[in-house]
Image (tube, helix red, strand yellow):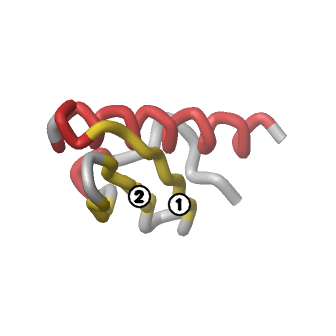
Amino acid sequence: MGSGLSTLDETSVLLEYRQVGGYVKVSALDPASHTEVSIGGDAARGAHALARLAVSRLRYVLAKQAAR
C-alpha cells in the first residue's frame, strides 16, 4: 500500500507540530498513501530540522512498506 520512495512528493507532505515545554512532537503524513509517522525532539533544534527528520522517517517507513 506504500507509495514508495520514488513517488514521495515532499511538497505535499503534511506536517503537524505540537509543543509541550521544550519538547516538540512532529507528525508527517503522506497524503498519497495515508502513511503517518511521528518524531519527538528538542524545540531548540528548530522547526526546519525537526521537519527534515520527520520526512526522513516517513521515507524510511515508505521504503519498508514497499519492500514487503
**Helix, strand, or loop for circle 1?**
strand
Residue identified by numbered label 2: 27
Q: Amino acid at mark 1?
A: Glu
Q: Is residue 47 left or right of residue 39?
A: left
**Residue 12, quarter of the rendered image:** bottom left
Residue identified by numbered label 1: 36
Q: Quadrant of the C terminus?
A: top right
Q: Which residue is painted at 44% across and 59% down in the image? A: 30
Expressed as whole percent of the image width and height from the top left, the position of residue 9 reads 33, 48
Say whether residue 17 is visible: no
The reply to whether dot 2 and dot 1 touch (C-beta < 8 Å) is: yes
Expressed as whole percent of the image width and height from the top left, the position of residue 23 reads 33, 48
Q: Quadrant of the N terminus?
A: bottom right
Q: Amino acid at mark 2?
A: Ser
Q: Which residue is painted at 57% across and 51% down in the image? A: 3
Q: Which residue is painted at 32% across and 56% down in the image? A: 13
